[in-house]
Image (cartoon, helix red, strand yellow):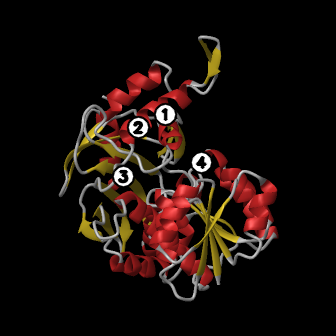
Amino acid sequence: MKVTVLGAGLVGGAIARDLALDEGLKVLSIDHAPELLEKLQAQADVEIACADLSDEAILKSAISDADLVVSAVPGSMGYQTLKRIIEAGKDVVDISFFGEDPFELDGLAKQNGVTAVVDCGVAPGLSNVIAGYVQSKMEKIDSYICYVGGLPRVRSWPYEYKAVFSPRDVLEEFTRPSRLVEHGELVVRPALSEVELIDFKGVGTLEAFNTDGLRSLARTMDIPFMKEKTMRYPGHANLVRAFRDSGFFGTEEIDVGGLMVKPIDVTAKLMFEQWRMKEGEEDLTVMQVIMDGQKDGRRVRRDFYLVDGYDTETHTTSMARTTGYTCSIVARQVMEGMFTRKGICPPEYVGATTGCYEHLLVELEHRGIHVEEVVTETEESSEERFVSVFQRQIA
């Protein structure tokens, strides 16, 4: 079978390298940057092609003989790329974090008999798979909370942060309003709001703040309280908020000495030079998913912990590992017929499908990525605890 991977960046490259380990797969990687493709080809048995994926004719020609497509393009072109893949009748697993609603393409995907798994990274992605799995195993879910973050192992002034994704995508997370669910109703809060300190085991004290990470869960899961928060080292939210509120993330062009420029483009250019992961620089991925509900008539809390580090053997960042390998494993599940649902499929649909969650965790373990689950019985209702947390943050 042939898999075509669109994008050869840190995450797209990790996906292609992982898929290329399967002798039965032929992997083609496409990107506009020849240096990324040459580096990837030196590391793995993949074919490469340098092309402008924003060109519709080029894209459709590039994927014409693919059995499955993986889309790892920047979020700014993610929705249009996904639409064109579906129009071509190709099954697809997508990690692009775009702002548009993927469910607008659900009818098109079903009409073309396409399985389109979207948001299939670590969070959204692995976190959604966990949510779908837990909901399928419990009588009732009262609350869902996800804390997640990618961090440099070594903290360096002034940002104490490094990015493995497109800088523009990262900055847009700080401007896009965050959606939460409270008492069964969708509410919107500003990004970077409601900062709280979290003692994360094995890492130390981190801060968590609202970002728009619930995505499809707000639509697909009948849970009265849901939120996702991004974690960084303490102080990051206030620093970034100062830039945002001063207009540095603006998308409207302004006149600077006779030149019309978008502030966010300048900011991304300057910040990413300091956020860029240097060769051999190590990172961490941390995540905790907390779900409260009822199982066999008992109140139960299920905590899922992930702490992953840089792979010194393959020189793969932790964020590329946790995001990319989740995607590549689910891509195999689609190709092997483990997951066959047609239409737009967020990862919670994968988690609710018999065998997919267990298979994903086993395959992640084989790659050195460990998800620990802790189950405890509780006295306080999850709703009472969830409300008290919200009240404490707002106060």
Foreground pick, 154 / 382: 154
What x and y, as percent, mark residue 12? 52, 62
Which quadrant, please, contains the N terminus? bottom right
Q: Which residue is mark 2?
A: 273
Foreground pick, 259 / 78: 259
Foreground pick, 56 / 36: 36
Task: Tell me the residue at 38%/53% (across/down).
Answer: 145
Q: How far is disc 1 from disc 4 in space, using C-alphas? A: 17 Å
Q: Do the residues under discs 4 and 3 have CB atoms within 8 angstroms? A: no
Q: Quadrant of residue 68?
A: bottom right
Q: What amino acid is at disc 4?
A: Gly
Q: Which residue is mark 3?
A: 148
Q: How far is disc 4 from disc 3 in space, using C-alphas? A: 19 Å
Q: Do the residues under discs 1 and 4 have CB atoms within 8 angstroms? A: no
Q: What amino acid is at disc 3?
A: Val
The secondary structure type at the circle numbered 3 is: strand
The secondary structure type at the circle numbered 1 is: helix
Q: How far is disc 2 from disc 1 in space, using C-alphas? A: 7 Å
How many neighbours does mark 2 have within 10 angstroms: few (below 14), some (14-19), or many (20 or more)? few
